[in-house]
Image (cartoon, helix red, strand yellow):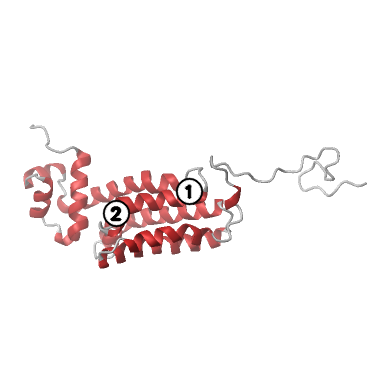
Amino acid sequence: MPKPLLSREELLGRLYETFSRYGYEGASMSRIAAFTGLGRASLYHHFPGGKEEMAAAVLDHAGAWFERAVFAPLEGVTPPRQRLLAMLDAIGRHYDAGNRACLPMLLALTEERETFGAAIRRLFARWIEGLTQTLCDAGLARDIARRRAIEGAVRVQGALALARALDDPRIFTAMAADLPQQMLTGADRSALWTARGTPRFPSPPSGGAGSGRSSRRGGAPAER
């Protein structure tokens, strides 16, 4: 068998560009062949299931990028604000501040949602949970954190879409500049994180002489 012209990673990248530019229906086999430089026979060799299998592989490819660039920073141990900034920076660069479509969201808005809905839901649910935990780590109650996480994801996706519609990347960059502070408002632990990412929470009472408290967990003040 002749050596493939593209690596698997390169092939998926070109397929991603095709689907994100033209959508699922608009990504005809002739356009896919033109973007990848592969003939139909070679494409069906890599993807016997045709265009549907290609789109599923591209969604997995997008999910792997989210794992590295979005979920990993959100689930790290750096300060919450730093996690949010890293997420926004990665999304801004990857989607070129709206000049490049977010394929998972694009497919979620079309009838292809029936075919790829489970993968899309898993991706966005994981994103919401990562944002929620980041805000909880900053000191917000979980219900408030989840509500703000959903609002934050809506603002990111809305800014990407509007920046693309108006051909104005400043819409995304302005949103990204304001979002971390808006999401962290009232987070009473946000100032306790050191530059190295370790929260400096108050130490528990030692229970030693002069502490004025019992050494037992939750104990009453010592009698004088």
User: In the structure shown, which secondary structural element does the residue marked by tag 1 occupy?
Assistant: helix
Find residue 65 and name its label. Answer: none
For residue 72, what is the image quadrant? top left
Q: Is residue 174 left or right of residue 21?
A: right
Where is residue 137 drawn, in percent x and y?
Answer: 55, 50
Q: Residue furthest right?
A: 224
Query: Could you say which is closer to the camera, residue 118 or residue 218?
Result: 218
Looking at the figure, which quarter contains the N terminus?
Answer: top left
Q: Residue at x 9, y 42 (%)?
A: 42
Disc 2 element: loop
Q: Give left or right: position of 43 versus 10.
A: left
Which of pointers 1 and 2 lies earlier in the amino acid sequence? 1
Q: Which residue is mark 1?
A: 82
Q: Which residue is mark 2?
A: 95
Q: Residue at x 16, y 61 (%)?
A: 25
Residue nearest the observer in this picture, 120 or 9? 9
Q: Is residue 186 above or below residue 216?
A: below
- Residue 36: give x, y in percent of width and height: 12, 46
Residue type pointed to by label 1: Gln
Q: In the picture provided, is 24 more to the left or to the right than 186?
A: left
Is disc 1 surrounded by few (<14), some (14 to 19) or many (20+) residues within 10 Å?
A: some
Q: CA distance from mark 1 to mark 2?
A: 20 Å
Question: At 20% from the left edge and 60% from the top edge, which residue is drawn?
Answer: 23
- Residue occupying the point 60% across, 52% down: 189
Residue 183 in percent (x, y) is at 50, 60
